């Protein structure tokens, strides 16, 4: 088992972590210096003297790039048990790292996440960020995780090629792994770990605005296709209703056109990395879902607009809000899913 630690401008906490790990286990430790520069060479030289392998980026490339560099090196060295990723800023205790490693050995088909419960004194920025990201991730992926931003993760050795293929060079890389795990057939296993924040998390190199945009981009990309399709469906509904004065024709015509657009966007843009999903497999499932959603759409429109007498625009908005989450969840978990079922296990 190998412990991989990406590090950018670390302090002595990295050395204390290494010493504590060495006292408790005999795991190999690989550290990636992500362009920290000469002022931090002392830290990395000391880590090397403690028995760690130190890989160096000439310039800062981002956490995702550092992790990929480590994954490539570990694969080339012939690691067979797995890799545990941990942060260098003291947020992960040695006993938690070792516990995640033990679970990863026992459950090689899972991505093991060291999940924090965010109890006690947690910086508001960290608590708010994780809450928002967790909620958006749950809505867009159909999966619930307690801690989507944890850097303490365990991967089996056979995941290394896949990990190297995931897009992203900075903090968004770790979110991309979670979002693409299901399509690759990998499962989640959560292990509770201690929540540790030193000096109110001041040592974090996470840039609130730019890095948040990178993290949320892959999530928002999943929602963009549905929103664009919804806007097209809305416009076509009004056009067909104005042209024909027939609600059934308007609903069906708008849904057929927007569903073709939505399928194309999802297949080529949203789920383009899922090469195993082919048209002859995904298209029948998708358009079966379209028929079902269309029936529900018409039923709700008839209820709100005809029976209740609500304005057409209001009826459309209420209908779409009702069906949006179900439609998107179905596409993620039925139409474009892999054959393996995603499972999340929580272990105290």
Image (cartoon, rainbow, N blue to C red):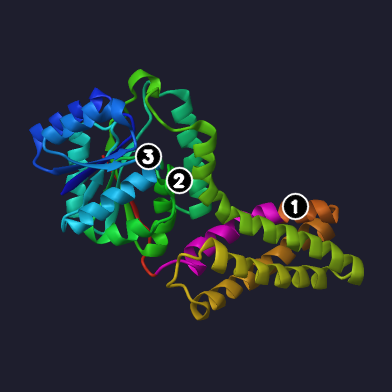
**Nearest the eye: 309 or 157:** 157
Tell me the quarter of the picture where residue 22 sits.
Answer: top left
Q: Answer whether residue 308 is visible to the viewer in this image.
A: no
The residue lying at 33 percent from left, 21 percent from top is 198
The residue at the far top in this view is 199
Left or right of 319? Residue 95 is left
Which residue position is annotated with label 3? 59
2 vs 1, front mark: 2
**CB contact under 8 Å: marks 3 and 1:** no
How many labels were placed on the picture?
A: 3
The residue lying at 33 percent from left, 33 percent from top is 36
Inter-mark Cα distance, 2 to 1: 32 Å
**CB contact under 8 Å: marks 2 and 1:** no
Image location (x, y in percent) of residue 263? 61, 69
Q: Answer whether residue 32 is visible to the viewer in this image.
A: yes
The residue lying at 28 percent from left, 55 percent from top is 110
Magenta residues span 320-338
The label shown at residue 172 is 2
The label shown at residue 317 is 1
Quick check: 189 above or below 98?
Answer: below
Tell me the quarter of the picture where residue 18 sits.
Answer: top left
Quick check: 212 above or below 272?
Answer: above
> Which element carries disc 3, helix, strand or loop?
loop
Neighbour class for label 3 at 10 Å: few (<14), some, many (≥20)? Answer: few
Image location (x, y in percent) of residue 95? 18, 34
Image location (x, y in percent) of residue 247? 83, 68
The residue at the far bottom in this view is 280
Of helix, strand and loop, which mostly describes the magenta segment? Answer: helix
Image location (x, y in percent) of residue 333? 48, 62
Left or right of 341? Residue 76 is left
> Which element carries disc 2, helix, strand or loop?
helix
3 vs 1, front mark: 3
């Amino acid at each position: 088992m190998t412990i991989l630690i990406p590090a950018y401008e670390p302090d002595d906490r990295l050395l204390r972590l290494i010493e504590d790990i060495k006292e408790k286990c005999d795991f190999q430790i690989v550290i990636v210096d992500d362009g920290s520069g000469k002022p931090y060479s002392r830290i990395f030289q000391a880590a090397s003297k403690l028995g760690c392998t130190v890989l160096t980026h000439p310039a800062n490339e981002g956490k995702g790039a550092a992790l990929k560099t480590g994954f490539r090196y570990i694969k080339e060295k012939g690691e067979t048990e797995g890799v545990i990723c941990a942060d260098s800023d003291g947020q992960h205790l040695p006993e938690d790292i070792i516990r995640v490693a033990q679970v990863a050995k026992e459950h090689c088909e899972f991505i093991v996440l060291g999940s924090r419960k965010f109890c006690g004194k947690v910086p508001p920025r960290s608590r708010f960020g994780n809450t928002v990201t967790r909620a958006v991730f749950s809505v867009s992926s159909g999966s619930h995780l307690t801690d989507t931003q944890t850097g303490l993760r365990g991967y089996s050795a056979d995941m290394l090629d896949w990990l190297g293929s995931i897009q992203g060079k900075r903090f968004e890389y770790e979110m991309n792994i979670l979002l693409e795990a299901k399509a690759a057939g990998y499962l989640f296993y959560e292990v509770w770990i201690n929540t540790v924040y030193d000096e109110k998390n001041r040592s974090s190199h996470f840039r609130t605005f730019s890095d948040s945009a990178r993290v949320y981009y892959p999530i928002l990309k999943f929602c963009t296709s549905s929103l664009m399709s919804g806007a097209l469906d809305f416009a076509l509904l009004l056009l067909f209703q104005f042209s024909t004065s027939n609600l059934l024709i308007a609903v069906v015509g708008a849904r057929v056109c927007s569903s073709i657009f939505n399928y194309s966007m999802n297949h080529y843009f949203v789920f383009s990395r899922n090469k195993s999903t082919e048209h002859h497999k995904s298209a029948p499932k998708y358009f079966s879902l379209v028929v079902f959603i269309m029936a529900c759409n018409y039923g709700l429109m008839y209820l709100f607009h005809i029976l209740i007498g609500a304005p057409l625009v209001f009826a459309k908005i209420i209908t779409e809000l009702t069906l949006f989450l179900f439609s998107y969840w179905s596409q993620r978990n039925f139409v474009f899913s892999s054959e393996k079922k995603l499972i999340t296990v929580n272990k105290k």
